[in-house]
Image: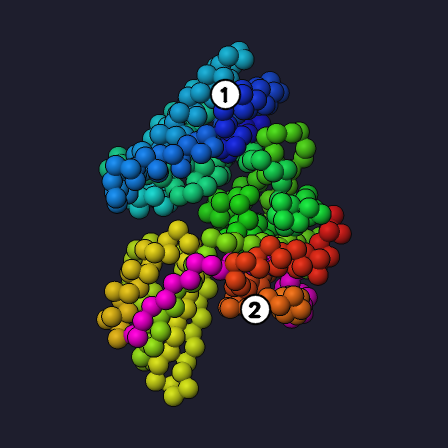
């Protein structure tokens, strides 16, 4: 078998943890498996590098930031390869460039365009364990790029597809995918398997188990993914295609995301093309917009447009939106960062009614006001005050009886 294993920052946090990873890789390789290991930077290293950048420059360029931040994963890949070699295996560390990961030129949020993997394939056939620095790639013009927060997950899934791997294992500090964050809901249950669609919703709604784009990639190319803990031998959660058994469960999990900011453009003239101009400008800055709510004034002449973006993009979005708002002759722009998004997710919602009503009733019963709502076939999300986020997760987990999940 060809197995791709990805280890996150907490799994390679120090020399002791890197040695533990090497031992796990060694055990896998001894069963006649070809192994490719993808590693993140050691826990906290990326934040240290970001801090260093802002000590020397008020607004460091995104191109130079990519070159700087990619170094964290390179350090880990070299150390991990050394540790694997120390256990008697041939090992080779590769950067994103050496792996042949080619991306577009959008620095800090690059998208993978292709993976050549020539060097890796040759080394695998020669009996090497390959250790790849995750989170990074290179443009056609040979500039280093990074794939955004959690990008090593995407590296692993994309490499698994490029190498036609039999399995992609994502090792982290949790045993798998739970019905809710077990730090908030101690009785949350681990799921044995979950559909790509449910995992995609959970990832996009705040679950930090897998990066959203990695799930999109796995779903598009049908890459089998298992989420496991690197701290024990417990079986993980299989992320796979939807089946009939999954459809019987109405709600699979509760997600929460406190990394949200709400921008409101007030008093916008209500005429065709206004929303298009506003969101085209925001999209041009590579800012991802989530919820959008529009309220028409009583006289029908003006409207307020509210939308959410990641909190990390909040101030950048505010400045951009203020500039656009002047062109639109809007009355003003407001930014709120004390908000959270709470979501219920389940493929069974396609064939069962009443989920939204039950969610709204539960939140109302506990005095939690809803600021905005968005839905899809398999999820309902509500925007609420951030101070109620953990309470909302707990009461919704109880309301949908998820502690009884398999």
Instruction: Tell me, for residue 369, which label it has, or none.
Output: 2
Estimate how packed mark 1 is, as few (under 14), some (14 to 19) or many (20 or more) residues with alpha carbons within 10 Å: some
**Residue 40 in sight here:** no
- Mark 1 vs mark 2, CA separation in Å: 47 Å
Q: What residue is at 67 percent from the left and 59 percent from the top?
A: 395
Quick check: 246 left or right of 220?
A: right
- Looking at the picture, how far across and down is residue 360, in whole percent? 62, 69
Front residue of this view, candidates 279 and 193: 279
Q: What residue is at 48 percent from the left and 39 percent from the top?
A: 153
- Looking at the picture, how far across and down is residue 16, in whole percent? 54, 21
Look at the image and give the residue range highlighted in magenta: 330-358
Q: What residue is at 53 percent from the left and 11 percent from the top?
A: 88
The secondary element bearing badge 2 is classed as loop
Residue furthest out toward the bottom: 299
- Looking at the picture, how far across and down is residue 396, in whole percent? 66, 59
Q: Is residue 44 above or below residue 124?
A: below
The secondary element bearing badge 1 is classed as helix
- Looking at the picture, how far across and down is residue 31, in whole percent? 62, 20
Type of colouring? rainbow
Q: Is residue 403 magenta?
A: no
Q: Is residue 393 above or below residue 291?
A: above
Estimate how packed mark 2 is, as few (under 14), some (14 to 19) or many (20 or more) residues with alpha carbons within 10 Å: some
Of the numbered discs 1 and 2, the one sitting upstream in the chain is 1
**Residue 336 in sight here:** yes
| Mark 1 touches mark 2? (CB < 8 Å) | no
**Quarter of the image where one finds residue 275:** bottom left
Q: Is residue 339 magenta?
A: yes
Quick check: 358 left or right of 149?
A: right
According to the picture, the residue beneath numbered tag 1 turns out to be: 15
Q: What residue is at 38 percent from the left and 68 percent from the top?
A: 264
Residue furthest out toward the right: 404
């Amino acid at each position: 078998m060809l197995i791709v294993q990805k280890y996150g920052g907490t799994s390679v946090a120090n020399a002791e943890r890197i040695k533990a990873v090497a031992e796990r890789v060694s055990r896998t390789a001894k069963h006649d498996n070809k192994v490719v290991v993808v590693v993140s930077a050691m826990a906290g290293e990326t934040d240290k590098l970001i801090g260093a950048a802002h000590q020397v420059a008020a607004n460091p360029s995104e191109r130079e930031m990519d070159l700087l931040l990619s170094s964290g994963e390179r350090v880990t890949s070299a150390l991990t390869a050394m540790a694997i070699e120390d256990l008697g295996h041939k090992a080779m560390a590769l950067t994103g460039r050496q792996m042949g990961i080619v991306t577009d030129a959008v620095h800090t949020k690059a998208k993978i365009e292709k993976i050549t993997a020539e060097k890796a394939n040759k080394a695998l056939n020669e009996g090497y364990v390959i250790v790849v620095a995750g989170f990074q790639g290179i443009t056609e013009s040979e500039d280093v790029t990074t794939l955004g927060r959690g990008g090593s997950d995407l590296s692993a899934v994309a490499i698994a597809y490029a190498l036609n791997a039999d399995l992609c294992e994502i090792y982290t500090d949790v045993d798998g995918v739970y019905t809710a964050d077990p730090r908030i809901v101690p009785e949350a249950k681990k799921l044995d398997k979950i559909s790509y669609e449910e995992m995609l919703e959970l990832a996009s709604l705040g679950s930090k188990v897998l990066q959203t784009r990695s799930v999109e990639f796995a779903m598009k190319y049908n890459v089998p993914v298992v989420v496991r803990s690197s701290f024990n031998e417990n079986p993980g959660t299989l992320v796979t295609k939807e089946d009939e058994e999954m459809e019987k469960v109405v709600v699979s999990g509760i997600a929460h995301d406190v990394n949200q900011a709400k921008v409101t453009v007030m008093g916008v003239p209500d005429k065709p093309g206004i929303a298009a101009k506003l969101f085209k400008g925001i999209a041009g800055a590579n800012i991802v917009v989530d919820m959008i709510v529009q309220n028409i004034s009583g006289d029908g002449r003006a409207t307020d447009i509210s939308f959410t973006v990641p909190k990390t993009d909040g101030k950048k979005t505010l400045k951009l939106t203020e500039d656009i708002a002047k062109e639109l002759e809007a009355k003003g722009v407001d930014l709120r960062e004390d908000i959270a998004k709470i979501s219920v997710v389940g493929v069974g919602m396609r064939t069962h009614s009443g989920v939204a009503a039950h969610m709204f009733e539960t939140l109302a019963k506990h005095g939690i006001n809803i600021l905005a709502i968005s839905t899809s076939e398999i999820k309902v999300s509500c925007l609420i005050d951030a101070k109620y986020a953990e309470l909302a997760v707990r009461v919704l987990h109880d309301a949908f009886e998820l502690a009884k999940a398999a």
